[in-house]
Image: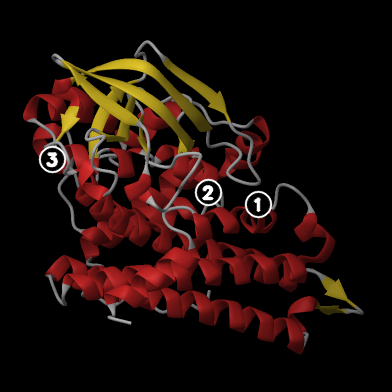
Amino acid sequence: MFRLPPRPEYFSADHEAFRAGVRRFVASEITPHVAAWDEAGGFPRELYRKAAAVGLLAIGYPEALGGTPADLFYGIAAAEEIARAGCGGVQAGLGSHGIALPPIVAHGSAALQRRVVPPVLAGEKIAALCITEPGGGSDVAALKTSAVRDGDHYVVDGEKTFITSGMRADFLTVAVRTDPANKGAGGISLLVIDGDTPGLARSELKKMGWWCSDTAHLRFDRCRVPVANLVGAEGEGFKAIMHNFNGERLTMAAMACSYGQACTEEALAWARQRKTFGEPLAQRQVIRHKLVDMAARVEAARALVYDLAYREQHGLGARTDLVARTCLAKVLATQAMQFCADQAVQIMGGMGFMRGTKSERLYREAKVMMIGGGSEEIMKDLAARQFGV
């Protein structure tokens, strides 16, 4: 509805064939169950295996590690189609490896890659990224979780919070401070910590939205982690984290556009069949204008996302410009999502306030999209600095 066909330089016939397959999978394996999974506070672990079987988890990863090499638009198509189910909790949990594995693939040793990546892409294991701490979120350079070298191990102490898939992850990609004398970015490294490591404790967190995505508070109490689990060189973790954030933010922007579209489509369907004073609600000018405003915001944000992905893929533009545009895309897309969710609930009236509708669920989930991966305020400030303001 209200959507023009995407430009062919973005999505080829192969992209669209892949999209169609993902749409069928989502329609059969995810959409019918999301309301029940949300109420239950979790989705079956078997969903990882099912998603892996149709190639969803392997997109963009090296073939030697069980992946399927693919350009950015395959990942965007997958993110958009999963978002059609209107449940961010499923998408966040199912895709947590998308932020946990890239640093390992880019910087980890061959042995570490072979041990961690293939079972995750096969849906047999779950991976999570652990950056945020109780005392700080976006200020990554100030993190306090320590990793002190002791022979062929690091001894890890500290806490992480708001960790997606943190309760059941088998592999944790954890940001730690390996140089206690360096209180800034240069003292930060990345370690893979196995989920069964002695001294690791997990507590489940309850949330406004994303109910079926487990979110955890983690405590590391003298956890001994092999030095072989170091991702890249000591002190190089901050750069890897920042690069990882860019990919996460682009994906979140694509997801937000599709969540906004889902709200718009649900509101339109409701307005067409709901009658007021003898006429369909959709015939009311005020309602029609709301729907057009919703579609306009989604399409404007999506245009920025697609253009950014194209530039990123083809190396067009300076790195600072691409980082700034990524920030802008996340801000505009999540604002569009919030606007559409709000307007959809308003159009649907009492039904929009009822649990079980996509719009009610996405209304609750809009805020985490505007905070996670870098808050709106941080995004604007980062963009300003990249533009030299």
Residues at marks 2 and 3, CA–CA distance in whole angstroms: 29 Å
Classify mark 2: residues with Cα within 10 Å, few (<14), some (14-19) or many (20+).
many
Q: Which mark is residue 107?
A: 3
Q: Which mark is residue 88?
A: 2
Q: Amino acid at mark 3?
A: His
Residues at marks 1 and 2, CA–CA distance in whole angstroms: 9 Å
Q: Which mark is residue 361?
A: 1
The residue sitting at 20% across, 28% down in the picture is: 118
The residue sitting at 13% across, 40% down in the picture is: 107
* Marks 2,3: beta carbons within 8 A: no
The answer to whether one can see residue 10 in this image is: no
**Residue 339 position within the rendered picture, expressed as x and y whole percent measured from the top left:** 62, 71
Q: Earlier in the sequence, mark 1 or mark 2?
A: 2
The image quarter in which residue 352 lies = bottom right
- For numbered disc 3, what is the local secondary structure? helix
- For numbered disc 1, what is the local secondary structure? helix
- Left or right of 270? Residue 135 is left
Residues at marks 3 and 1, CA–CA distance in whole angstroms: 37 Å
- Left or right of 18? Residue 130 is right
Q: Earlier in the sequence, mark 2 or mark 3?
A: 2
From the viewer's side, name the closer residue of 261 and 143: 143
* Marks 1,2: beta carbons within 8 A: yes
From the viewer's side, name the closer residue of 20 and 287: 287
Camera-side mark, 3 or 1: 3
Classify mark 3: residues with Cα within 10 Å, few (<14), some (14-19) or many (20+).
some
From the viewer's side, name the closer residue of 253 and 130: 130
Q: Earlier in the sequence, mark 3 or mark 1?
A: 3
